[in-house]
Structures are given as structure tokens and as C-alpha cells.
Image (cartoon, helix red, strand yellow):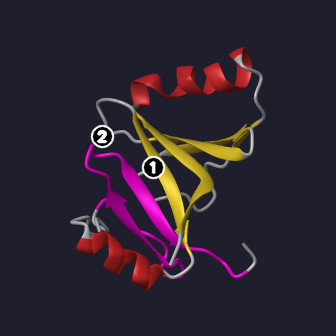
Amino acid sequence: MTFQGSINIAMKIPTAQFDQTVAFYRDVLGLPAEDVTGTEIASGVARSVGVEFGPNKLWLDEVPNYSRADVWLELSADDLPAAMEHLAAAGITARDELEPLPDTMRAHWIANPAGVVHLVAQRSSSG
């Protein structure tokens, strides 16, 4: 069983800071950005903009009930059940109450000891 960092990074942003944060990445830094609001976005997310962040995708998610920004990371595992067992043995438990996942997604939320949220997703056989 192995872990890999994945391409997705989510920044959960309070409503009062969302437009300025999007403008920073899109207008100030000039990074390509696509508003995906109106498509299937995560429950609890009001608006979402995907930003090309080098080889990564930075998701800027407006979360109205947040008081400060929070960064969430994604990991992939070649064997999700074994990965979750490994994490549990190290005292890291699933935190799936944090945000609902689509029924078709094989993944779990966890948090590192500092409280940073990570999505641990089953890696596809193609990589």
C-alpha cells in the first residue's frame, strides 16, 4: 500500500473574502481560472472556482459559515481499505462528517495532527 500527493488542493474561503481571493489568483497573478458554480460542487460550498496552479488544481470554495480560510489537501492510495487501516493504526481516523462525498467516490476525509484536512482517495489503475 502506498500514498501519493494528488493534484487537488482546496481552499475553503469565507464569503467576505471569496471575491477578493478569486481576483488575486485570476487577475493579480494571471492564473487561468474557471468558475464551476452551478455544476456539481461539494455540499456546503456556495461557489467554486478552479485555478490552474502549475501541475495542481487549486479549488477556491466559498463556504458561507467559515470565519477564516482553510486549506485542504488530497492524497491518493493504491489500496484505500489498507490505507485507512494503516492510518487507523497510527491514530488517524476517518472524518467523513466534514463534507459529504459523492456515492460513487471511493475516498475518506482525514485530518493530520495539526488539523489540516486531507482527502484520501482510491488511485485509479491508470495512475
Amino acid type at image mark 1: Val
- Horizontal side of residue 53 vs 14, given as left or right: right
Quadrant of the rendered image containing residue 71:
top left
- Do we see residue 43 in this rendering? no
- Horizontal side of residue 90 vs 86, given as left or right: left
Name the one closer to the observer, 118 or 45.
118
Extreme left residue here?
91
Mark 1–mark 2 CB contact (< 8 Å): no
Name the one closer to the observer, 41 or 79.
79
Residue matched to label 2: 65
Mark 2, other Cα within 10 Å: few <14 / some 14–19 / many ≥20 = few
Name the one closer to the observer, 68 or 84.
84
Residue found at x 66% / y 25%: 25
- First-in-chain label (1 vs 2): 1
Name the one closer to the observer, 116 or 50.
116
Query: Does the magenta-highlighted stretch encompass residue 105?
Result: yes
The region drawn magenta spans: 98-125
Asked if 92 appears above or below 14 in the picture, the reply is below
The picture places residue 55, in percent across and down from the top left corner, at 74, 45
Residue 2: mark in rendering? none
Query: Does the magenta-highlighted stretch encompass residue 73?
Result: no
The picture places residue 83, in percent across and down from the top left corner, at 42, 76
The picture places residue 93, in percent across and down from the top left corner, at 25, 68
Residue matched to label 1: 45
The picture places residue 117, in percent across and down from the top left corner, at 37, 51
Q: Dot 1: what SS? A: loop
Asked if 104 appears above or below 20 in the picture, the reply is below
Asked if 71 appears above or below 96 in the picture, the reply is above
Residue found at x 44% / y 47%: 72
Locate the C terminus by quadrant. Answer: bottom right
Q: What secondary structure characterizes most of the magenta part?
A: loop
Residue found at x 25% / y 67%: 90
